Image (cartoon, helix red, strand yellow):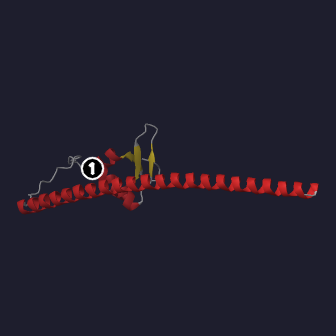
Amino acid sequence: MDDEGDAWLTYAEAGQRLGVSPEAVRAKAIRRGWRRQHGNDGKARVRLPFDAGEPVDRAVNTQSTPVRKSVDPALVHALEGHVASLKAEIEHRAAEIDALKAQLAGAEAKSERRGRQDRAGNRRRRGAQRDAEGRHREDRNAARGRTATGR
């Protein structure tokens, strides 16, 4: 206890004092805005206000007991049917994806062939153009040579 009457306790100690689980103390500390900090021992501590509650002598259940609910067989059957339909839908979509992948691969191969053909055609056209320009230069030079010699 400090001089104000408040106490810094671990969540387990506060749970024992209040008669609740450590998790309940954490939730209560958050809801009520109690100060929290880590101690030198690495354990989280909460500043338990003096008026937070009276000490309780009863034992505290620190573990939740699982609650078993009955399961409706009709619901289970309906869910199993839905799961089966979803699996069938997944298989259908996977087949569609495979078909689209094959279609894409075919289109890419066709595009690559066209690209190669276009590049080859462009090389032939450029070569023919260079040949034509060379012949034109030769004809022009020959014509200049004839005029220079007076022919």
Q: How many labels does the image show?
A: 1
Residue 102 is situated, as x and y percent measured from the top left of the image, at 34, 53
The residue at the far front in this view is: 151
Q: Of the residues shown, which amino acid type is indicated by label 1?
A: Ser
Q: Residue 18: x and y, percent? A: 29, 52
For residue 98, side relative to residue 72 (left or right): right
The answer to whether 151 appears left or right of 79 in the picture is right
In this image, 28 relative to 116: left or right? left
Quarter of the image where the C terminus is located: bottom right
Q: In the picture, residue 148 is in which quadrant?
A: bottom right
Residue 111 drawn at (x, y percent): 46, 56
Residue shown at 51%/53% (left/top)?
117
Residue at left 22%, top 46%? 63
Determine which residue is flagged by label 1: 21
Residue 54 visible somewhere in the drawing: no
Front in this rendered view, residue 62 or 15 = 62
Q: Is residue 85 at least partly visible in the picture?
A: yes
Is 131 or 96 nearer to us in this picture? Answer: 131
* Element at label 1: loop
Residue at the spot x=26%, y=58% of the render? 93
Label 1: how many Cα within 10 Å (few below 14, some 14–19, many 20+): many
- Residue 75 against residue 35 in the figure, above or below: below
- Name, please, the residue furthest toward the left: 73
In the image shown, does 64 or 17 lie closer to the viewer? Answer: 64
